[in-house]
Amino acid sequence: MRLLLIHAKTFSYKARERAIEEGEDVEHGNREGVFENALVVFVTVEEDDGRNPAVVVDKAANDVMDVVKKVSASTVVIYPYAHLSSSLAPPKTAINILDSLKAALSERGARVTRAPFGWYKEFVLHCYGHPLSELSRQIVASEEATKRTFDKKYYILTTDGKLVKPEEYEFKESELELKILVDKEVFRKEFEGGQGRVQYYLRKFGFEWEEYSDRGHLRYEPHATLILEAVSAYSWRVANSLGIPIFRVRGTNMFDLNVEPIKQHAALFGERMYEVKMDIDRFVLRFAACHQQFSILKDWVLSYRDLPIGMFEIADSYRYEQRGELILGFRLRRFHMPDLHILTRDLEEAKRIALIVREKIMEEVKKVGRDYQAIYNVTEDYLNMHFNHVVELVKREGKPVLLVVYPAGIYYWVINVEYVIIDELNRPREIATWQIDVGNAKRFGIKYVDENNMDRHPIVIHTAIIGSIERYIYMIFDKIAHDEMKGISPTLPLWLSPIQVRLIPVSKDYIEYATNIARILTNNGIRIDIDDRDESLGKKIRDAGVEWIPYVVVVGEREVKTNTINVRIRKSGVQRTLTLEEFIKILNEELNDYPKIESTLPLHLSKRPKLYYLQPLTV
């Protein structure tokens, strides 16, 4: 904010006509004024003032009152003036801040008036001319003032309800992963860096930083695209399996920070907001699907009979992570969040549905062959009033959790649970999450009609059951890294393998036979390709291994004569002769209820260039 303060013997103004469309409506009496012994405060509200308007207004009011007392002005005139800066706040933001400044000065005992914003005005000014009659000020909210600071309390909460301070807790031999988590979160222990196998796997399958974009943005080569699409489709199946009505939607990724609920919600993320500036307007890129889903839900007419009800979107999400913290596949500035919000009638129903969500989270991580450590973030009032509920949740975890207690009312949630894996390099990595939100329904105007025909605000459960799409993929590859350290050949689950079956004809004479097999497998939803290159059989089999192809089918004279196929199975290292019907049955049983996604590559390898990311690499 920029201020020009003039101590005027006389000052008068008259508003002539609107200068901008957003110029505020004013009654006739506010269009002009005449004042004596006035401190005229020419004010330019700047773009950054909207980040922390309360701090800016408080500082400005204090500075103005200091001058009022020194010059003994009898009145203060706030005069909007757009010519002190080239970085202007949006009109709505400017009007709100000007009104807040007027109120703050009144509260401090000043007699204050304000000229209208957004009008062409004429004015006549007679300045006193003494040493303090012309002053200027620049008001800036300090970096420290924009950060939310508060005391958090850390405990280990056991399954029998005991709260133990982390420094006093005696970790069992089986609780090594919990200790790693506590060391990181509580004692801020720094772990060794370095590139693990997961980073190598991700690059190998075409997950790469996009050098032509902002840091933290990925590009997805054909194999990576297939994996991303498969996990995206699966995330919808998981959300839709909870046993409650779920509606899938789509929306925009950019929201106006002039909209009050957007501004309030975005302020909670502080420096992690990813902003876009267009002319004098500021937009925030969404950090999940919250803004879009809440915007839709506020327009729905809901009854208590409709609840619980869920809304789902795979939202391209943006968080302005620090450059030094960016991690390929895990900590990104742009990622995909399979975000589910469930509306419930009250806190008790939310607690019941949260148990269902939690069970589904556990079910999904066990399918991957992993286990979670948990961080329970709770507000102090919720912990005191619902301690037994928190203990019941921990009993279901079957092991102690890290409990972090926050002051009441600082966020919109009362309990926020983060599920963490310990990766191949012994570093905690958050994957899945759920939380109970008691504030955003009111903030965004989401309502339902209860049994007594009264409007009520629902309680909202936020959850990403499998985590973000990229973090789920990170967890899959991390499991493979753990397996490889045990001597197990790296292999993707069949449903995620970009190519599930590779057909290798031993010569060109058998390409037609392979093509017929490919057609049948494709019709059954299996991703296949044909290695029709002029290469040796040994090289073709080795190249299939480079891509971790789960099933390699070799066809030659014997297979044609017996109407069979020779199948090499990567996971077991076994080679079997099967009929095509037997093979399809095996594939379908392994795919089970997982989605079947079409291939992202041409059928024949001869039609593909040598994709760099599928070549043998070193870590």
Image: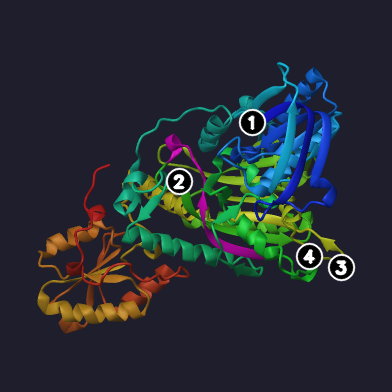
Q: Disc 4 or disc 1, which is closer to the eye?
A: 1
The quarter holding residue 245 reads bottom right
Q: Look at mark 3 in the image and give the residue it sits on.
A: 451
- Residue 471 in the magenta stretch? The answer is no
**Residue 196, position in %: x, y?**
35, 40
On screen, residue 488 versus residue 171, left or right, reads left
The quarter holding residue 605 reads bottom left
Q: Amino acid at mark 2?
A: Leu
Q: Amino acid at mark 1?
A: Ala
- Structural distance between the alpha carbons of marks 3 and 1: 47 Å
- Residue 325 in the magenta stretch? The answer is yes
- Label pair 3/4, CB-CB below 8 angstroms: no
Q: Look at mark 2 in the image and give the residue it sits on.
A: 332
For the C terminus, the quadrant is top left
Q: Look at mark 4 in the image and give the residue it sits on.
A: 448
Q: Nearer the viewer, residue 490 or 10?
A: 10
Looking at the image, tell me whether mark 2 or mark 4 is earlier in sequence order: 2
- Structural distance between the alpha carbons of marks 4 and 1: 39 Å
Give the magenta part as a residue range: 310-326
Crowdedness near tag 3: few (<14), some (14–19) or many (≥20) residues, C-alpha within 10 Å: few
Of helix, strand and loop, which one carries label 3?
loop
Please say if 458 is above or below 86: below
Of helix, strand and loop, which one carries label 1?
loop
**Residue 83, position in %: x, y?**
61, 38
Q: Nearer the viewer, residue 190 or 443?
A: 443
Q: Amino acid at mark 4?
A: Tyr
Looking at the image, tell me whether mark 1 or mark 2 is earlier in sequence order: 1
Looking at the image, tell me whether mark 3 or mark 1 is earlier in sequence order: 1
- Label pair 4/1, CB-CB below 8 angstroms: no
Q: Look at mark 1 in the image and give the residue it sits on.
A: 141
Q: Amino acid at mark 3?
A: Glu
